[in-house]
Amino acid sequence: MGIYLDTCCWNRLYDDLSVYKNRKQAAAVLKIIKWARQNGVTVWGSDALENEISQIQSADSKKYAYVSRLYRRTITETAEFADTAFGYVEPLAKSAGIAGIDVHHLAFAVGADADYLITTDEKFIARASGLKVSVRVIDPLNFKYK
């Protein structure tokens, strides 16, 4: 089994936790990370994640330090960019209204053969729900432990 947490998840731990939903999602992300470690589940990283996380640095260097450290300590494998996965995913994603970096996250997750792409982005989840791809895009609150 493998999971791919998008940048929203890595950031959620350092967002405003006085907001109830943020607090619940942050706790769920931490629980998923802990569960993955305890069960030897692959946590996929990618160039897309590293690029997006690096962009935090200019806006908030302290948050960047926390997010990047957690990311580096947590991922167990790095997905390679696969032209075949991107070529398959891009037209499906675009037809569903998925654009920008989310297309790359989806392609990396599919290329890595991850079981789940976990995100807090409700629009991404809704748009990906009908896609015929091998990875399931879900909110951390809806993750089912196996």
Image: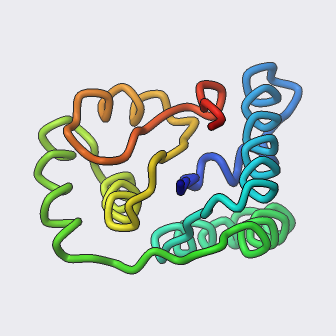
Residue at the image position 41 percent from the left and 31 percent from the top: 125
Q: Is residue 2 left or right of residue 30?
A: left
Task: Name the residue nearer the viewer: 90 or 116.
Answer: 116
Residue 29: horizontal and vertical position, in percent? 73, 42
Residue at the image position 48 percent from the left and 77 percent from the top: 47
Q: Decide: is 126 above or below 121.
A: above
Task: Give the position of the C terminus as an image quadrant.
Answer: top right
Residue 64 falls in image quadrant: bottom right
Residue at the image position 55 percent from the left and 53 percent from the top: 3
Q: How many marks?
A: 0
In the rendered view, how is the structure colored?
rainbow
Q: Decide: is 139 above or below 10.
A: above
Q: Is residue 13 left or right of residue 135?
A: right
Residue 76 falls in image quadrant: bottom right
Residue sitting farthest toward the top? 20
Q: Is residue 72 left or right of residue 82?
A: right
Residue 126: horizontal and vertical position, in percent? 36, 25
Residue 115: horizontal and vertical position, in percent? 45, 48
Residue at the image position 40 percent from the left and 39 percent from the top: 136
